[in-house]
Amino acid sequence: MFEEFYGFERTPFSRDIPTLELYRSSTLEETLSRLSYVASRQLFCVVTGECGTGKTTTIRRFKDELDPQKYVIMYIADSKMTPRNFYKGMLDQIGAESRFYRGDAKRQLHKEIELMKGIHKKQPVVIVDEAHLLDKEMLEEVRFLLNFKMDAESPMALILVGQVELWDKLQLQSYTAIRQRIDMQCRMQQFDRSQVTEYITRHLEYAGCERDIFSDEAIEAIYRYSGGSARLINKACTSSLIFGCQNGKKIIDDHMVKMVINGELS
């Protein structure tokens, strides 16, 4: 729709942009570096951030950068996950048929990990997304994974990803046993004003656009609306481009952005 009007080769601000094309903020770079260390050392890490700060996008990039010759990734994202489904989900991803009972499935997973590390010389990396939605029973089950020791080393890298409520929950006394096992914490931050400009510019470059489409005042309005949230930046930019296309405007100014925000996005 608006892509042809603005001369784009690809759609900017979409959720399916290849990870290598993403804007690499300082926070993203630091988090990727930390996660790479977590994977190599087989540590327990918690990644938290407000809604829209790019947690899942960061994990996408992290997964794409891991060497498949060295690592096996098991990714779980299920807000209503039960212990049995947890083990079944991981076993399914490594091509093993899960036993019916939880205890049997747990022992089966441990056996598969032994084979993975001992025979195939690969390191398992377990990523649990939307972890702030897990109840205490499930978080305890996740912790039990780390209790399986192999020659005094951790059996896997374990990464919990969730909104800031996850870290708040882990501060409660009832979660002390889990909290004490955490080796590293990563906190995703919203973009600042200059990063919002860089983010928008990078996405337009990905679309094949080499000229400025959003005025400085428009970007300021987008920053004030979004608070630096990547998700809200995408929403404001896409809606503004559609509005600009419908009204024959090649440049998006702050008045157009404000009209969109006060109309469609309010």
Image (cartoon, rainbow, N blue to C red):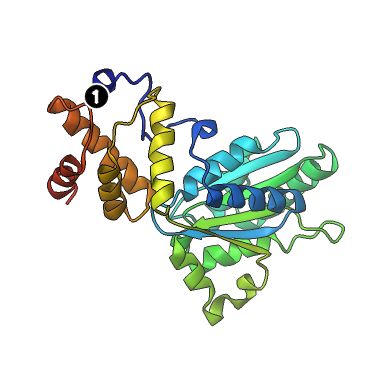
Direction front: furthest residue: 216
User: In the rendered structure, which amino acid carries the disc numbered 1?
Assistant: Phe
Can residue 6 be spotted in the picture? Answer: yes
- Between residues 208 and 143, which one lies in front from this camera angle? 208
In the picture provided, is 23 more to the left or to the right than 3?
A: right
Image coordinates of residue 89 in percent, x first then y, are 56, 45
In the picture provided, is 129 more to the left or to the right than 217?
A: right
Image coordinates of residue 170 in percent, x first then y, are 53, 72
Can residue 92 be spotted in the picture? Answer: no
| 199 up-or-down from 101: above or below | above
- Between residues 196 and 100, which one lies in front from this camera angle? 196
Pointer 1 residue: 2
- State the residue at coordinates (46%, 62%): 132
- State the residue at coordinates (63%, 59%): 45
Quadrant into which the N terminus falls: top left
- State the residue at coordinates (48%, 72%): 168
| 50 up-or-down from 16: above or below | below
Direction right: furthest residue: 151
Helix, strand or loop at label 1? It is: helix
Image coordinates of residue 79 in percent, x first then y, are 43, 55
In the picture provided, is 32 more to the left or to the right than 134?
A: right
- State the residue at coordinates (17%, 33%): 243
Q: Quadrant of residue 66?
A: top right
Image coordinates of residue 21 in percent, x first then y, are 50, 31
